[in-house]
Image (cartoon, rainbow, N blue to C red):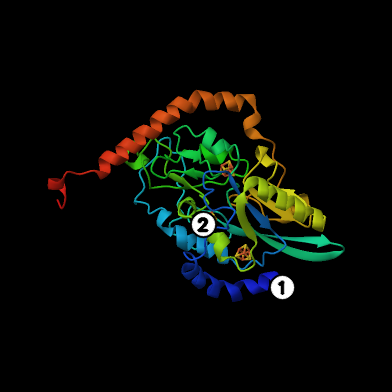
Amino acid sequence: MPEKISRRSFIKGGLAAAAGIAASSLPLPATVKGAAKEELATLIDIRKCIGCEACVEACQEVNGHKHPEPKKPFPKMYPNRVKVFDWSEKRDVTDRLTPYNWLFIQEATVTVNGEEETFTFPRRCMHCQNPPCADLCPWGAARKLKNGITRIDADVCLGGAKCRAVCPWHIPERQTGVGLYLDILPSLAGNGVMYKCDRCYDRIEKGKLPACIEVCPENVQKIGPRDEIVKEAHAIAKEINGYIYGEKENGGTNTIYVSPVPFKDLNKAIEKGPGKPHLKPVADSMAHADNLAKAMVIAPVAGIAAAVGKFYKFTKNTSYPEEKGK
Ligand code: SF4
Ligand code: SF4
Ligand code: SF4
C-alpha cells in the first residue's frame, strides 16, 4: 500500500479528535478578514494531501447539526418510479458523497517519470461562479452568496434533484423523509432534501475558517479572494510545471486544484460514479442560451416558491404563548 494511504488510519483518530478543539480557535487569514462579501475561492494543492481524512471527520463533526433526521416510514410516492434515497442507516460511509458526508478523499495512482505514484485529494462541491444548481432550481432553494458560496436551503428544498441533474459533477445528494414536502405534498413532491458542502457558510460569517481547511495538518487547502487564489495557483503551476482544474471549468469555479500531473491522467485513475465526481474538462453550462432562457422563466416562480416555503415554515414554528406546552 502506498505510504500516503498507509498513514491515513494512523493519523485519522488523533486529528479528528483535535478538530473539535481547534475548530473555533484559528482566525481567517488576514487577506480574508472582513472580506465575507467578496468572492472567495479555495486552493487545493494535491501534492500536499496525505489522505488522512481529518478534513472528512471535521466536516461531519462541525456540520452534523445540519444533517437530515428523516421521519419513517416514508410516505408512498406517486408515481412510484420516484425512488427512495435513504442514507440514514449508512451515516458512516466516507468513501463517497452522501447527505451525511459532504467531502471525501479521492485517490489516483498514476505513472510519473516511469514510477507509480498515488495522489489523494479532497472532493466536494466546486462552488461554481455561475452555478446551474442555483440558476435552475425551480423553488429558489439553491442560491449563490456574494462570498462565492453556493448553498441549498434545507427549509425550502423539496428534493426534486434538479440541482443534481444540472450540476456538471452531480454533487448534491438526496435524503428521503425530511423537509417541506412531508408537510405540503408528501406523495407528489420531490421526495426529500438535497445536501452538499455549504463551505461552512456559518463559520465564514463569524470570521472562522471552513472546518476542513482549519483541521488539515498539511495545509492542503487555502481560502482567499478569488483573484489572489488564481494568481497563487498559477505561480505554483509554473514552479512545478503543473496543471490547474477549476479556474475555467463550468465557466469558472471557486475551488481551484493544482496538480503536478495532468488532470486527464488523474481522471482516468479515479473511481467514478454516484457520489464520486469526475475530473473532466467542463464547458460553461450556463452560457448555453436555452439554459439562460429557462433560468429567466423560472426566476419569478422560484421567488414565490421560496417565499411560500419560508412563510409556511414560519407559521408552523410559531405558536401563541397559550399554545405552548400543549
Ligand atoms: S486535505 Fe488535509 S486533512 Fe484532508 S485528507 Fe488531505 S491531508 Fe488530510
Ligand atoms: S459543483 Fe454542482 S452543486 Fe456545486 S455549485 Fe457547481 S453546479 Fe452547484
Ligand atoms: S467547507 Fe465545510 S461543509 Fe464544505 S467540505 Fe469543508 S468542512 Fe465540509
Say which mark, if any, is on residue 3: 1
Say which mark, if any, is on residue 101: 2
Residue 213, horizontal then vertical, whole percent? 57, 60
Residue 251, horizontal then vertical, whole percent? 67, 37
Of 108 and 208, nearer the camera is 208
Which comes sooner in the sequence, label 2 or label 1?
1
Residue 249, horizontal then vertical, whole percent? 68, 41
Q: Quadrant of ligand 2?
A: top right
Residue 186 occupies which quadrant of the picture? top left
The residue depicted at 64 percent of the width and 67 percent of the height is 218
Total marks in image: 2
Most extreme residue toward the right, as rendered? Answer: 114
Task: Name the amino acid, label 1.
Answer: Glu
Describe the element under mark 2 as helix, strand or loop.
loop
At label 1, counting other C-alpha atoms closer than 10 Å, the crowd grade (few under 14, some 14-19, many 20 or more) is few
Q: Is residue 247 above or below residue 32?
A: above
The residue depicted at 34 percent of the width and 51 percent of the height is 71
Of 271 and 2, nearer the camera is 2
Give the position of the N terminus as an image quadrant: bottom right
Residue 48 visible in the current orientation: yes
